[in-house]
């Protein structure tokens, strides 16, 4: 959950060398360095590869630009006529994203065996949102309008993105990733009538495709904003391809522990904003409640409900890790 990033001075130092964010993501030496930074500082169990979910549209012919204070901007997809171009770029994935695979390989080689390396990608719906709407955080009107006006093309777009992500995750696993996480962050904005077709089905198809090639590698899904019935449907489906569900802060963990944990491992869901407060007591109280709820059952990974923000206080991360390490020793 954005382990690396702007709250770390050593990250900001490397970042300053790369005005172009995508060049940074696709530079194995720099990406490996910032992937390892949080593990040098904190006693973490896993490293998440430094890259971005937007590498996929970037190499499918929709370049991503990044301006300070504005965030990423994907060259828009706005017409069914652009599907053929996307389809034509699918075969480029192994070459175009070889730098990310190299980062995985170098990170795996740099860490002891008991530290896991986690690869990742965006969920198909989330990627579609970034391609159709410039800033999904401001709403996904274009995505919804496109899905309504061109239902078949929308399904085709999700299918191409699913294939691209399967190839991308497969490449990361072949390069040494021990687990992979699918960030379906903008599932949060998906209206219920579209959920099955736009989120549940593509996310499941993506995980199933990866499992077919790499049956031993755990797949974690982060369907941010999924309701309780939607989470249950993901966890309980026959031949569920997910080893774990990563839960946003809004999910009731005691419900999830009772209903989901018998089917899948859980990850999450500490509020990342607690790590921005001078007083660590609320953060530690929340952590203890989380551990007492979900870590007493098999299958629980301590994590946040969303990414670390630039305002995160480093001593809080230290205290959090220490508290996990000493919980019931
Ligand atoms: O230095 C900077 O200014 C860039 C900040 C930044 C970082 C550190 C971006 C831009 N991406 C990343 C790395 C990143 N992104 C990782 C690396 C691993 C880690 O250290 O955790 C991961 C896993 C992501 C995933 C990602 N990118 C998501 C899914 C998770 C989530 O936050 O919901 C999303 C939505 C993105 C898009 C993106 N990339 C960057 C930003 C600021 C955003 C969000 C844009 C927005 O919609 O506002």
Image: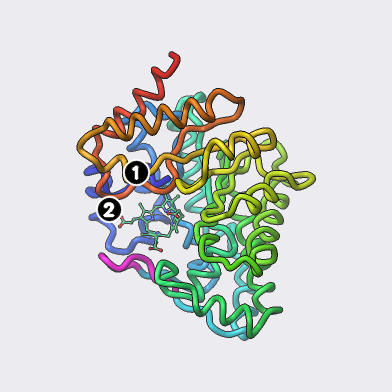
Task: Give whichever of discs 2 and 1 has the lower sequence position.
Answer: 2
* Residue 236, image x, y percentages: 73, 44
As measured in the structure, the alpha-carbon distance from the residue carrying label 2 to the one carrying label 1 is 9 Å
Q: Is mark 1 within 8 Å of ligand 1?
A: yes
Q: Is residue 217 above or below residue 127?
A: above
Q: Residues within 10 Å of mark 2 (few under 14, many from 20)?
A: some
In depth, the one of 184 and 233 nearer the eye is: 233
Which circle marks residue 15 in the picture? 2
Magenta range is 66-74
Q: Nearer the viewer, residue 327 or 106?
A: 327
Of the pair 300 and 210, the residue shown nearer to us: 300
Secondary structure beneath dot 1 equals helix
Magenta-drawn stretch contains 73? yes
Which disc is residue 153 wearing? none
Per the image, is 78 magenta? Answer: no
| Element at label 2 | helix
Compared to residue 228, the image places residue 149 above or below, namely below
Residue at position x 48%, y 51% in the image: 100
Compared across the picture, whether 101 is left or right of 6 comes to: right
Ligand 1 closer than 8 Å to label 2 CB? yes
**Does residue 148 sit above or below 163 in this rendering?**
below
Residue plotted at (34% across, 36% down): 38
> Decide: marks 2, 1 in contact (CB < 8 A)?
yes
Residue 34's disc number: 1
Ligand 1: image quarter: bottom left
| The C terminus lies in quadrant | top left
In the figure, is residue 61 to the left or right of 34? right
Task: Tell me: residue 19, above or below residue 250.
Answer: below
Q: Quadrant of the N terminus?
A: top left
Residue, far right: 238
């Amino acid at each position: 959950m954005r382990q690396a990033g702007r709250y770390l001075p050593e990250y900001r130092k490397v970042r300053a060398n790369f005005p172009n964010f995508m060049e940074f993501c696709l530079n194995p030496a720099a990406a490996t360095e910032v992937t390892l930074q949080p593990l040098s500082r904190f006693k973490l169990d896993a490293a998440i590869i430094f890259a971005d979910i937007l590498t996929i549209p970037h190499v499918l012919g929709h370049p991503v630009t990044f301006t300070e204070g504005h965030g990423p901007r994907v060259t828009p997809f706005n017409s069914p006529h652009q599907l053929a171009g996307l389809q034509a770029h699918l075969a480029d994935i192994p070459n175009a994203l070889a730098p990310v695979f190299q980062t995985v390989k170098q990170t795996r080689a740099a860490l002891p065996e008991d530290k896991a390396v986690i690869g990742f990608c965006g969920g198909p719906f989330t990627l579609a949102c970034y391609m159709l709407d410039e800033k999904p955080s401001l709403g996904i009107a274009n995505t919804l309008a496109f899905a309504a006006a061109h239902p078949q093309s929308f399904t085709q777009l999700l299918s191409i993105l699913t294939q691209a992500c399967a190839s991308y995750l497969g490449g990361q696993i072949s390069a040494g990733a021990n687990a992979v996480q699918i960030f379906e962050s903008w599932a949060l904005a998906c209206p219920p009538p579209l959920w099955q077709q736009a989120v549940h089905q593509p996310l499941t198809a993506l995980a199933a495709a990866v499992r077919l090639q790499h049956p031993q590698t755990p797949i974690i899904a982060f369907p941010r904003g999924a309701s309780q019935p939607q989470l249950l449907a993901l966890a309980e489906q026959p031949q569920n391809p997910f080893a774990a569900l990563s839960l946003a802060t809004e999910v009731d963990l005691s419900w999830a522990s009772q209903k989901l944990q018998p089917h899948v491992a859980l990850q999450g869901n500490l509020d990342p904003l607690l790590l921005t407060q001078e007083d660590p007591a609320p953060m530690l109280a929340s952590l203890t409640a989380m551990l007492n709820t979900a870590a007493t059952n098999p299958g629980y990974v301590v994590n946040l409900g969303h990414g670390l923000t630039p305002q995160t206080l480093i001593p809080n991360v230290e205290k959090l890790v220490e508290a996990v390490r000493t919980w019931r020793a």
